[in-house]
Each structure stands twice: as structure tokens, then as C-alpha cells.
């Protein structure tokens, strides 16, 4: 069913709209081009359209794509989470995990024209936005939060998510997601161990991080494919100013491309490994995979008074018994 945004308004005179496929091509050219190739003049020369027409087409397509959010971008329900945790255990030997969290930076091509512009000064780029991505082992994005400035720490952005604020609505007992050492541990988030200043990491913690990295690489690939499919993210040529609408426009475009990413994952569109930019990767390494066996403490819930690190300590004891001894 065509979206109403592509229909001629009743009683309105004028030429009929450009065919939807043509408007879609203009939008795909915009998000599939890095740098100045995505701007208005380039679009006008490529498609022989009038000034401002590219923006109109893109806004229409974005609205239509975002209307598909409930179908292609949602947190898995209880039944699907059970399937995800079973598959993750089978392939990676990581029990009760339903997702992988990671923060990434989307560079801004222009300095923000606002008082808080220094906040957008990111860790790797001149100016950027931080986006939290939570995907499953199939590289499908199940949750994201965009709009924070590039200086925002990953854990700060995660604290603003509904997963952190309302875990009971997103996790069944024992279920959790994983992340790197930037995240604070909780019963619902298991992160890598940090290396203390001027200290060597213990063998057990090294092995735990190694085990964690074998699953975390799926998140790295997910983000790499997302940026590779939609190169406009490598330098967002949209000006941020004092008006909140300027950020909303960028966030809405991010939403649309993430929905498109999930559509391509769901319909089996083959990914191109050449798209993955290893500059975005953490220091990860492959590890051995092993099946998960039932009947241990990991099947018990964590009481509210337990330390925040208790879930990770359970996993550490589990891995130590099954994988680390005698290595």
C-alpha cells in the first residue's frame, strides 16, 4: 500500500507527483554518497530536478520509511529473546545473552552553530554525534539512541536508554546484553574487564575478555556495514544550530537508514565485506566456540542486593570451569 505522502492532495491543483521510484532514487543517491556528492547541486545535475526538489523528495521518502518502524525496528519479545539467547549460546558459548551494545561516532561535516558546539567535539573526529547501537548476533539492530554530542561517554548514552531505565520491560530473568569496558556492569549489562593503571590484567580476566570479543565482533561488523551501506554517515552535511529541529532532522534520517539496514538484513541482502572499515573496530580477537550446558548457577536470578558485578562474576566462574582451565 503506497504511503499517503506520495498521493496528490484532494482538491489541490498542479502537476502530479514524480513517480515514487524516482523520488526513492534521489533519496538513495543522497544517503549512498559521501561528501559533497550528496548535496543539492549534485542531485540537481544528476537527476535534472529543480532547486529544493531533492529536499522535498528526501523528506517524503524518510517519512514513508519511518512509518515502517514498528515492523522492522523493535526490541524482541519474550519468545524471540529465547530464540536469540539459544542461538548465541550454541554459536558462541555465551549464555543468556540477547544483544550486543556499542557506541559509535557519526562525524559532522560542519562545526555546529550553537553555544554547545564544543560538546560535539568527539574522540576521533572534529565534530560528531554519538549513537548507541544494540544489535543481535544476526547484525540486526534492535535498539538505538541518537542525538547525543560526540563528547558523550558510551555509558552515559546507555544510561539514557529505556533498556537501562526499564530493564523489566526488555529482559526476562537471567537475560542480559554485553558491551566493552566502557559500560558499567549490572544484572542486565555484562562488560569487559578494564586494565588498571600500571597493572597487568589477570589471566582469567584476559580470557574472559577474549571470550567476550568473539561475540562483540558481530556488533563491530554491524556498525561497519551500516556505515558502508550509507556513506553519508561518514560526514553528515547537515548544519546543527540552536534550533532543536536541526538535530531532529539528522536523527530522523539516522532512523530511516537503520530501518533500511534491518530491511536488507531481513530480506537476506548480501553484505559486502569491503564496506567494513576496521578503523572503527576495538581490539578484538577470535576465540574458540563452545556449547552452553544447563544446570549451573547462571540459571538463578540475581537478588537486588547483590553487587552490580555479580552477573559478570557468574559468567567468569562459568567460563573458568569450562574453558579456561588447562588452556
Image (cartoon, grey):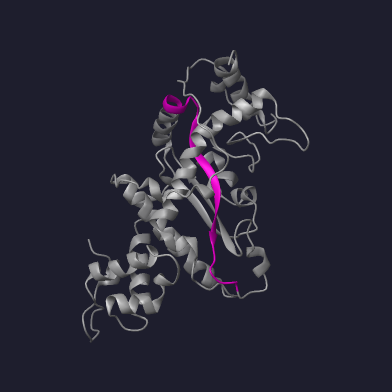
Q: Which residues are magenta?
A: 89-112
Name the image quarter holding the C terminus.
Answer: top right
> Which of 254 and 13 lies nearest the eye of the viewer?
254
At a point 50% along the width and 29% down the height, the residue shown is 96
Name the image quarter holding the N terminus.
Answer: bottom left
At a point 45% along the width and 44% down the height, the residue shown is 221
Q: How far across and down, in percent of the image, does residue 63 sit? A: 36, 66
At a point 40% along the width and 44% down the height, the residue shown is 140
Q: How far across and down, in percent of the image, does residue 97 sit? A: 50, 32
- 55 lies left or right of 130: left
* Quarter of the image where one finds residue 253: bottom left
At a point 71% along the width and 35% down the height, the residue shown is 195
Whether residue 69 is visible to the viewer of this picture, yes or no, is no
> Which of 291 and 73 lies nearest the eye of the viewer?
291
Whether residue 211 is visible to the viewer of this picture, yes or no, is yes
> Which of 173 and 271 lies nearest the eye of the viewer?
271
Can you say whether 227 is above or below 187 in the image?
Answer: below
Amino acid at each position: 500500500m503506497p504511503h499517503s505522502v506520495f498521493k496528490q492532495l484532494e482538491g489541490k491543483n498542479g502537476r502530479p507527483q514524480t513517480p515514487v521510484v524516482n523520488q526513492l532514487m534521489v533519496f538513495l543517491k543522497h544517503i549512498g554518497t559521501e561528501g559533497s556528492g550528496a548535496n543539492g547541486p549534485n542531485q540537481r545535475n544528476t537527476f535534472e530536478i529543480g532547486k529544493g526538489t531533492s529536499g522535498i523528495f528526501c523528506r517524503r521518502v524518510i517519512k514513508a520509511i519511518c512509518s515502517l518502524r514498528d515492523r522492522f525496528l523493535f526490541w524482541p519479545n519474550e519468545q524471540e529473546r529465547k530464540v536469540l539467547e539459544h542461538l548465541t549460546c550454541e554459536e558462541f558459548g555465551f549464555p543468556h545473552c540477547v544483544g550486543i551494545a556499542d557506541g559509535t561516532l557519526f562525524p559532522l561535516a560542519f562545526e555546529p552553530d550553537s553555544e554547545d558546539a564544543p560538546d560535539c567535539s568527539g574522540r576521533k573526529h572534529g565534530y560528531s554525534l554519538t549513537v548507541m547501537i544494540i544489535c543481535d548476533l544476526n547484525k540486526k539492530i534492535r535498539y538505538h539512541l541518537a542525538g547525543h554530542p560526540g563528547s558523550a561517554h558510551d555509558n552515559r548514552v546507555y544510561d539514557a536508554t529505556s533498556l537501562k531505565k526499564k530493564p523489566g520491560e526488555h529482559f526476562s530473568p537471567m537475560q542480559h546484553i554485553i558491551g566493552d569496558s566502557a559500560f558499567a556492569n549490572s544484572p542486565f549489562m555484562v562488560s569487559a574487564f578494564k586494565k588498571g593503571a600500571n597493572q597487568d590484567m589477570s589471566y582469567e580476566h584476559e580470557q574472559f575478555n577474549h571470550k567476550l570479543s568473539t561475540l562483540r565482533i558481530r556488533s563491530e561488523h554491524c556498525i561497519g556495514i551500516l556505515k558502508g551501506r550509507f556513506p553519508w554517515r561518514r560526514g553528515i552535511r547537515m548544519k546543527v544550530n540552536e534550533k532543536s529541529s536541526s538535530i531532529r532532522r539528522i536523527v530522523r534520517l539516522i532512523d530511516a537508514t537503520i530501518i533500511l539496514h534491518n530491511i536488507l538484513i531481513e530480506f537476506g541482502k548480501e553484505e559486502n565485506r569491503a564496506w567494513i572499515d576496521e578503523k572503527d573496530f576495538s581490539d578484538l580477537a577470535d576465540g574458540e566456540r563452545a556449547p552452553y550446558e544447563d544446570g549451573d548457577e547462571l540459571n538463578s536470578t540475581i537478588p537486588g542486593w547483590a553487587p552490580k558485578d555479580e552477573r559478570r562474576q557468574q559468567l567468569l566462574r562459568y567460563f573458568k570451569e569450562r574453558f579456561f582451565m588447562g588452556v
